[in-house]
Structures are given as C-alpha cells and as structure tokens.
Image (cartoon, helix red, strand yellow):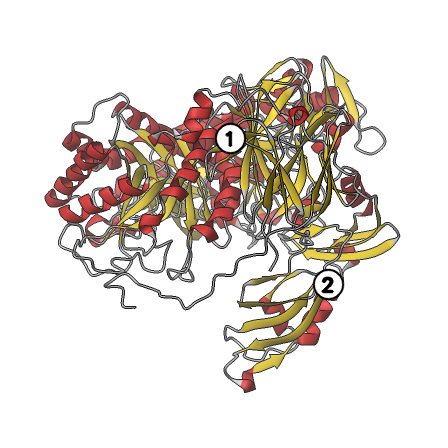
Amino acid sequence: MKPSLIAVTVVWSFLCLSPGAARADALDRGFREPPAEARPWVYWFWLNGNITREGITADLEAMKRVGVGGVLIMEVDQGAPVGPVDFMGQRWRELFEHVHVEAKRLGLEVNMNNDAGWNGSGGPWIKPEQSMQEVVWTEIDVSGGRRFEGRLAKPQATADFYRDIAVLAFPTVGDYRIPNIESKAAFQRRSDRKPVQAEFSSEMIVRRDTVVDLTERMDASGKLLWDVPAGQWTVVRFGHTTTGVENAPAPKTGRGLECDKLSNEGIEANFDAMMGKLVADTGLKPGRHKGGLVATHIDSWENGSQNWTATMREEFQRRRGYDLTPFLPVMTGRVVGSLEISERFLWDLRQTVSEMVIENYAGRMHQLANAAGMRFTVEAYGGPCDAIAYGGRSDEPMGEFWTPSGAIETCRGMASAGHVYGKRIIGAEAFTSADKERWLEHPAILKSHGDRAFCEGINRFVFHRYAMQPWTDGRVPGMTMGPWGQHYERTQTWWDWTPEWHTYLARCQYLLRQGLFVADICRVQSEAPPQGFGYYDRRGYDWDECGAEVVLTRMAVKDGRIVLPDGMSYRILVLPWSQTMTPGLLRKVKALVESGATVLGPRPSASPSLSGYPQCDEEVRQLAAELWGDADGQNTTEHRLGKGRVVWSYLPEKVLAESGVPADFTAGQPLRFIHRSTADAEIYFVANLQPYEFTTTCSFRVTGRIPELWWPDSGRIERAALWEEKDGRTHVVVPFEPSGSVFVVFRERSQKNDAVLLVKHDGKEILSAIPEPPAKIVVRKALYGVLDDPSRTRDVTARIQSRADAGEVAFSTNTIATGDDPAPGIVKTLVVDYEIKGRLFHVKGQDGRAVHLSDRAPSVTIEKARYGVLNDPNRTRDVRDKVQRLVDSGQSSFKVSLMAEGDDPAFLVVKTLEIDYLKDGERRRLSGTDPDTIEFSPVPIPPRPVAAVRSDAKGRAILEVREPGEYDVVTPSNRTRHIAVKALREPVEVTGPWLVRFESGRGA
C-alpha cells in the first residue's frame, strides 16, 4: 500500500508567499458561502395525476434541506397508474397554488413547463386551426383543348380540419422529383438539405411563366370550371391541415394538439389556457420575485416540423420580397424554372419558417412570460429554425447532457446563445440517463460529467430528475419516472448526504456567472436553415458560435476586436465554409473588416436565396472581390481591406498563433477549462475528467497577478505555492485528485514572485513551474476518410503536422473534415504514423473519437475476450485475437458491433463483449453490449506524484511527500532549501470485523 501525501511544514521566511492569506472580498465571500440563487435545481416530474398536498410539502422541504434551489415542474405519463388529479383541473390548480405558497415559504424558485409532457406547447385547448400546419395537396392530369368541369378532390384533412391555399395548373412534366423534398420543404426536420445538381431534359421542368393560378375558378365545394389550353396539364389543389402532432408524453387530461409555431396566435392561445391561469391563481405580478413561481419553460423540440400558417403567403412576401404561389409545385418535389431556382426557393421557404418560429413562437413567448412577471427558459434545439437565435429569445437558454455520454454539444450551443445574446444564466438538463442507471449512479460518478458541462459554459444544473413522491409513509423506493433519469429524490438512500455535493455545485455556478466568458474566436453558422450548432476542438483557444442575425444586428469593431453590446468580444470571426452567402451578411462582413476585424473563411461566389436573383449573385461576387482580393486559398491566403484583413483559412488557432496571440490555456495533461473575466479578476475553472490523480503545470495567458487556488469541494482558498511568470504567461503547478477540479483565480497584482519554482527529489526534478517543452512530433503519414476507397480518402499529413507543431496532441477525429470532407455523411477513419525521439507510433480512430499523439503508447495485452450471448456457448465467439489486432493497430476505441463482422454469433440478437486484459501490468476488465463503444484509455496514466507544495492560511509553504529522500525546494531567485525526509509513517491498515447497518424499511 502506497502512503498518502505526508505534510512537512516548512516555515521559511524566504518562502513566505505573501504577508498573509489571500484577501477577502465579495467574490471570496460568495464563493465560500454561495447565495441561494447559485444552487442547483431539479426537474420535478409529476406522474400521471399522482399528486398530494402532503407529498408536495415533503418534497419541497427535502429539497430545501439538502441545498436544492429550485424546481422545473413537468407532468408526464410514463406508465404510472392514473391518479385522481386531472391536469389543470380545479384540484390540480389548487395544488399548484400550494406549490407556489410553500416554495415562497422555503425560498425555492418554481419554473413551470408551459404544457403537459416534456416537448413543445400544446394541450386539449388548442383548436385545429391554432395548431401546427402543413401543406397538403391533391392533383389530377387533364387533357387540353376542352372545358374542364369537375370537382377537385379535397386533400387530407387531419382532425377534420382543412383550408384551401391555391389551385394551380401547369403543363404536365416527367416523373423527376427533387431528392429529400420532405426535409427541404420543411415537412420534416432532417439534416440532409444540400442542394443537388442533376442533368435532365426540359420536359422535367415546369416553366414559371406557364403556371396558371386557378384559385378563383374553384368554388367552396371544390368544383373547378376551366377552359384548358392545348396539351396535357396537371391541376393541383393546395391546402393546409394540422400536422396532428400532440404534446407528449402527457397524461390524457393534458394531451392535445401542438400550437402553431409560426403565428403569435398559436402560442398566445396556449399561454392563456394554462400559464395565464396559473399566474392569475398565484397573484403573480411583474417584477423580481423571491421564491414561488418565477419562470415558465419550453423543453426540447420533439414536434417534427411545420411549413404553413394562415398568414404564410403574406409573411413570405414581406420577408423574401416575392410571391411564393407560383413555386408551390416545388413543395411537391417538382422543378420550377430550373433546379437551381427551385433549390433557392426551398432555401427561402426554410428561412422564412425559421424566422417565424423564432419571432412568433419563442419571441412572443418571451414577451408573454415577462409581461406576466416570469422569466422564460428554453431548450432551443431540434426545431426547424436557427437554434442559437431561438435560444437568444429566452431569458435562460438550456442545453442537456446525459450519462454516461450524449448531447454535450447542446451545452456548448446554448452557452453560445447565452453569450452572444447577453444572457447571464445558461442552464442544462443535467445527468439524464436511460434504464441503465437503475439506482447505480451517485455524485462520485456524476461529478466529472458535470465538470465537463461547466467547461462548456453551463452555470445552472437542473438535475434530471426528481419524481414527485405523493406518499409520506416511508414508502421506498417510491414513485419513479419509468426508465428515465437519475433517481434523485428524497427516497434515495444517500439523499441526506448530498448537501456538500450541492454546495460544490453552487460554488462552481456562482463563480461561473461572474463577469464575461473569454473566447478568442466567434464562428458563424452556415446560413442554410435550419441551423443547429457545431462542435470544435478548443486547442487552447475558446470559441462561441453565432448565426447571421448576431453578425447583422449585434456586431461592431472596437480596437481590432469584434464586440457585442453586452460586453463580449472576440479576436477573430470565422465564416462558414461555404461557397454561398447572402449579400446582406457579406455587406456587414465587409463593414467589420474595414473597421478593423480579422475574418477567416473562403470566398463565396453566389447567394443561396432567390430574393433579388440573379442580381444578388453579382453583388456577392463584387463584394467578395473587394474582401478577398487576390487571395485564392493556395498561393495567397490573406487580403487587407481598410483597418482589417480577410484570411482564407479554416484554422483560426493557427492564425492567432502566427499573429502573436498565445493559447489562453495549456497543460501537461488532458484537462478541460473555461475562463471568465471580471473588472478585478481572471477566473479559470480547470477540471480533470480522468479517474486518476496527477500533478501538472498549467499555463495561463495572464501576467502581473498572483495565482490563487480556489477549491470548490471545500471552499478553501490559498495562494498557489509553485508558480512562475515567464514569456507573457503564468505557469502554475496544480495537483489534481481523480476527477478533481479547481478554480485558478488571478486577483492581486504581483510585485515580486519568490514562491517555489521547482522541487527536486534525490537530485531529480519532480515538480517545476516551467513547463518542459514538448518532444517534437514528426508526422510520417496521416490519412483520413474511407480508407479502402482512395477517391474518398485525403492525405492529411500536413494538416496533422501543423496541429502537432501548435502543441495540439489530442483532438476529435471528425474535426479533420472541416473545410474538406472526403465523404460527407459517412463515418470516416483517421490513421496517423508518427515519430517521437526516434520511436515510431501508430494511432487510429473513427469519427467522434479522440486521437492522442503520445510518446508512451500504453501496453495492452488481451488475455480473454468473448462476444455473443455469453450464457450460451453455441452463440458465443472467442474474439481475443481480433481485439488484440485492433489494439495493436492503434485503435483504442471501437464499437462492440465490430466484433460481428465476418462472424456474427447471434444474428439480430443484442450481444455482449467481455474483455479481460493487462494494461501496463495491471489486470482490468471491460464489457459492453451492442451498440456500445469500448474504450481503452488512449492517454497514458501518469505516475502518482511523489510530492506536492501548497500554502497554508498564513501564506507559508507546505511540502507534502509520499517517499523518503533528499528534497530541494528552489525559488525563482535561485534560493534553495534542503529537506531530508528519512522515513514516513507506515500506512495504518484498518482491519475487520465490520458491522454494517442498513436503514430500516429498505429490504436489506
């Protein structure tokens, strides 16, 4: 058994780090004792009408007792027996009023979802004409040269609702239909919307000037009278009906149609029928409230899409500048005018839908909530719109993250929405899980997942989930929410042990709301609607993402930086890697460059829109010529205009480094970070997501200030004991526990640093504030793509070498596709052969996995590996050699299902892979089922630190050691103190027998 660190207190005058402890101020006090508003929240799920007054009080008091600060209420149906309380019935409303009163008494905040279920906005009060609408049609072919007199078939009428839009006729064309028209015409919300290019005859094209509007010739019964010109004609009756989508998963008494997302009237009807009544019941008034009902919420978009509303034609005309009626046949998949013109119309249609969702749904909801005295929170992604602009219409955008993994990109996306639209609090549905949780997870497992979300910009956790417990008779485990979420309620065995965990989170959330997020890069999303958000490696430089709306309406330039009205600023603006851009956006980019901005991206050559076509394309080419000049991305990559410049590059980190801007944060071990800045302090949160401890040197782009270590698990604040300022950076040695985290805060101005610079053990340097320069990595060969298909594979040797030269040794494989994707929509593989200090290494990884260029390849020996239905020998295979080959080839992660290739032991049955292996001499086991991913750690585990140096409350240096020997402690002025540690106390083994007691009533 290795001993823990043993403290040797060294009271040396020349090693006194300061006259005393770190100063105390409001920031310090708020960290030690975080305010109530910084506490984490819970999703409080009410299950199918099983609600009691006593249960409400018991739940809220239990939350208050352990440090939960608020609740987000949703009532859902997840299979629980139907209870006695009907959603929004009189008894239900009385119980909600009781929630409001009790929450105010306890100082807890209440956020009420705006409908039953967890998606959208709807209920039994939404009439079909107020619901989500889509275009429907019927068509008939008629022969010309005669009078047509007949009744056109009525299109589909879902929920017995239908309204006509138009009747159009055009010469009959061939069978060609635009691929993926359901997505491109916003019938569905899918990602495959890229314009297509195809060669076909003119017989497949509807000429725009041949489209005849027959709307006025059809009567209310659908009867059409028309003298048909010569030839074959197609007559289409267009109308709209409800999509039929309902809010879900809602109890029967709260279930109904989803409201129209393209009109103010839709969300107004929903608000008035539910939240408006609850506001009246509670007597809520505009203004800031302490406790009780304070907010309303829209959760994740799981409602599909819609592409029509009663005012669609007028809205489209106003926004796009032309009438959409002649282009309605495009929504059936036909080509009108040309394929290019049709694709441009579809782009305009989706853009109009996006704008209307943002303004008439989210924007109007924000107005209604604020006018009633509530904040508005939203999970603003998955819909047929610009997700970041959608989130910007809320008071508090929210992402989500799952355990063991999933959806972390939504946290960064919603954090970007918060940053670029000036929102202080960015929430997250936290630690969501499926049926594998089974009461097995606990805060020690959750912590690293939460720290990752903090580093993405989240500063309010809303635990998923707390199931409302209607009973107070000690019934356990009590009510659950089907297979979903953490079992995070008062019936959990460790519930009353969570106050310290919640205080840890509150300390983090308090500091992560101070000042402004620090990012060097702002990436502009593609203009192709609907937009989600990307996810990019940070490489030491942090980033935000925004849509065209932010560039057009919120960006300016000051002192060479791109600035926003709320204080955010960036060094570089990165344009989408696209050949198209709207003239309006390009005009604004030109104005920013002329004012001093640095902009990265390729030269566009056309507009994606039909608005102003074809003149719009000429304007784009003219503006691009002024902005990019003679830059071609190959021989010339930069052009200056006015006070700024345009760089044809997709590597902003490389451009920043070449401009003399060092990385904001680097470290000798894989760490996550986020940086916030106030008028008086630079605040870095640094997290070790690995399940092992290490000590490493962290380097910060800060000078002239003393580094302090603020430990959120304990509230302890100490000056860093081992640090040095050099080359425009501050280097700090930080010890990290397994899954440990710390805030490194720079407040006080430094006069002279004579803290510890390095520590030697038996003459060997073991700790140093000066980071050792990384070993040179020489990339011999790097390929990326579909490796058995040369046409879909790229040689990326130069690109990987550039990253390695910039100090980037770990990165996500799919980031290699940026700017040049060799196989769009297909999972690709990266293989890298490289050399360090004369040794050759090989790594391999698929999209979505991390690749690490290390000089210490972990030794993995597969002892045993079985795959199949493991309790059935006939359906189980020995795959030891197969797994060993994968590991030896450098593939440290792979899908379990890969084992089925060439020999599937149980076709169409979920199989299990179980691996026993040795890694660096230590015996370990991994297992997973289809379609899990097996992960052998690609990063070598560093040895446990022999020693650590910290400061005490009086500013004195404390040396802590694990091994005996001769220690030398050296300061920046080269003063040395020698300490001889002859022996350490032997570890004390606590032996049994053990007496274990369980809570009564737990069945143990």
Which quadrant holds the N terminus? bottom right
- Residue 546 x, y percent position in the rendering: 55, 30
- Report which quarter residue 344 is drawn in: top right
For image coordinates 83% across by 34% down, the residue present is: 634
Q: Please, is residue 980 above or below residue 570 in the view?
A: below
User: From where the camera sits, is residue 841 visible?
Assistant: yes
Please state which amino acid type lies under the numbered disc 2: Ser
- Residue 659 x, y percent position in the rendering: 76, 24
Q: Count neighbours of disc 2 (C-alpha within 10 A) and say few if under 14, some if 14 to 19, many if 20 or more.
A: few
Q: Is residue 765 left or right of residue 368?
A: right
Which residue of the protein is positioned furthest toward the front in this rendering? 982
Element marked by disc 1: strand
Which residue of the protein is positioned furthest toward the bottom in this rendering? 874
For image coordinates 62% across by 25% down, the residue present is: 17
Find disc 1 in the rendering and name its residue: 717
Q: Which mark is residue 379?
A: none
Q: Mark 2 or 1 closer to N-term? A: 1
Which quadrant holds the C terminus? bottom left
Q: Count neighbours of disc 1 (C-alpha within 10 A) and say few if under 14, some if 14 to 19, many if 20 or more.
A: many
Q: Residue 268 or 887: which is nearer the viewer?
A: 887
- Report which quarter residue 684 is drawn in: top right
Q: How many marks?
A: 2
Please state which amino acid type lies under the numbered disc 1: Ile
User: From where the camera sits, is residue 530 visible?
Assistant: no
Element marked by disc 2: loop
Find disc 2 in the rendering and name its residue: 859
- Residue 363 x, y percent position in the rendering: 37, 28
Which residue of the protein is positioned furthest toward the right in this rendering? 838
Q: Please, is residue 178 above or below residue 8 in the view?
A: below
Distance in Å between CA atoms under marks 2 and 1: 39 Å
- Residue 759 x, y percent position in the rendering: 72, 38
**Discs 2/1, front:** 1
